[in-house]
Amino acid sequence: MGFSTTIARDPVNKVIGDSSLEGKFDQNLTDIDEQSRIRIHLKYVENFIRNQSSLSLMKCNALDYLNGYWTQGQFPAHNRYQQEGGQQQRLPRFIDHNGVHCAVGYMILKSPGFEHLPNQINTNYEYSFIDEIGNSNNSDLTKWMNMYEFNLNELAMIQPTYEHMRRPQKKVWQVPQLQPPTPMASQTPQASKIPPKVPEMSRVRAFFRRCFDFFS
């Protein structure tokens, strides 16, 4: 069975990409939230492994743990921002800052006798992919894989990646542009209603003219 990694540039799984989402969502995955994306992936891989061949009781038990895990829907999260200019937006996380286990870690945690193993792995491989953890020659992990009949490829198919915290957009403070003051309407001074003063000599001449006219 072939898997596609063409839907998203940064897929939910390193091995099968976003094959679980094909035909269900748009190419940019803008119409699906993070929790649903992980849940759909885990359900898809669980069904894929169950349908591969006849399974032992131990492997069925582990897949039952996986089923309960994704049904509950509590998944790890990153509590730090992606590095500036980083290409990898999504990374795995074995146990997060709130003590939430990844899918593989939860399957191991629920397995009797292996309750200590997730924390042991998380000490050195908190953000590692399964193939890196498997190559660490952890004897307890090898013992668990043999007992529950999982290979590294199956565990790598299960392991989701999680998106980093998104950096808040920087606010750009814009200095308000000051508007020039509105010019006041020019006030034209009203013409003075006071009659112009008559020069003193003109008054004297007018007085004598009236007197002359009176005695004439």
Image: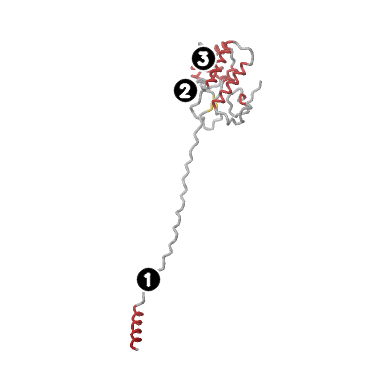
The amino acid pointed to by label 3 is: Lys
> Where's residue 51, x and y in %?
63, 16
Q: How far apart are marks 3 and 2 (CA)?
A: 18 Å
> Where's residue 211, x and y in %?
33, 85
Of 72 and 60, nearer the camera is: 72
> Where's residue 136, x and y in %?
54, 17
Question: Residue 207: which disc?
Answer: none
Q: Which quadrant of the figure contains the N terminus? A: top right
Q: In this view, does 196 lie above or below 178?
A: below
The residue mark sitting in front, 3 or 1, is 1
Q: In which quarter of the image is residue 214?
A: bottom left
Q: How many other residues sit within 10 Å of disc 1, few (<14), some (14-19) or many (≥20)? A: few
Question: Which residue is labeled 1 in the image?
Answer: 194
Q: State the residue at coordinates (55%, 12%).
A: 144
The amino acid pointed to by label 1 is: Ile
Q: What element carries label 2?
A: loop
Question: Which residue is labeled 2 in the image?
Answer: 98
Q: What element carries label 3?
A: loop
Q: How far apart are marks 1 and 2 (CA)?
A: 93 Å
Tag 1 or tag 3, which sits nearer the N-term?
Answer: 3
Q: How far apart are marks 3 and 1 (CA)?
A: 109 Å
Q: In this view, does 138 lie above or below 210?
A: above
